[in-house]
Image (cartoon, rainbow, N blue to C red):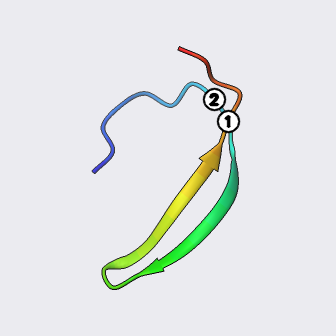
């Protein structure tokens, strides 16, 4: 579950099918 404030726009770098749905990897320039 995601809880937070979105402060950047990213692009989908990878999509991985899972039994429960899909896993996503998002590339972003955000650097805390």
Judged left or right of residue 19, residue 7 is: right
Q: Which mark lies nearer to you, 2 or 1?
A: 1
Report helix, strand or loop for mark 2. Answer: loop
CB atoms of marks 2 and 1 within 8 Å? yes
| Distance between the alpha carbons at the discs numbered 2 and 1 | 7 Å
The residue depicted at 60 percent of the width and 18 percent of the height is 31
Residue 24 point in image, percent of width and height: 53, 61
Judged left or right of residue 11, residue 3 is: left
- Decide: is 18 above or below 9: below
Residue 7's image quarter?
Answer: top right
Q: Residues within 10 Å of mark 1 (few under 14, many from 20)?
A: few
Q: Looking at the image, is mark 2 or mark 1 earlier in the sequence? A: 2
Residue 19's image quarter?
Answer: bottom left
Report helix, strand or loop for mark 1. Answer: loop
- Decide: is 15 above or below 3: below
- Decide: is 28 above or below 17: above
Residue 12 point in image, percent of width and height: 68, 56
Image mark for residue 28: 1
Residue 30's image quarter?
Answer: top right
Residue 28 point in image, percent of width and height: 67, 35
The residue depicted at 71 percent of the width and 27 percent of the height is 29
The residue depicted at 53 percent of the width and 14 percent of the height is 32
Identify residue for label 2: 8
The residue depicted at 27 percent of the width and 51 percent of the height is 1
Q: Residues within 10 Å of mark 2 (few under 14, many from 20)?
A: few
């Amino acid at each position: 579950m995601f809880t937070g404030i979105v402060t950047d726009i990213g692009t989908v770098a990878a999509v991985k099918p899972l039994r429960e749905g899909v896993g996503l990897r998002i590339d972003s320039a955000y650097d805390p």
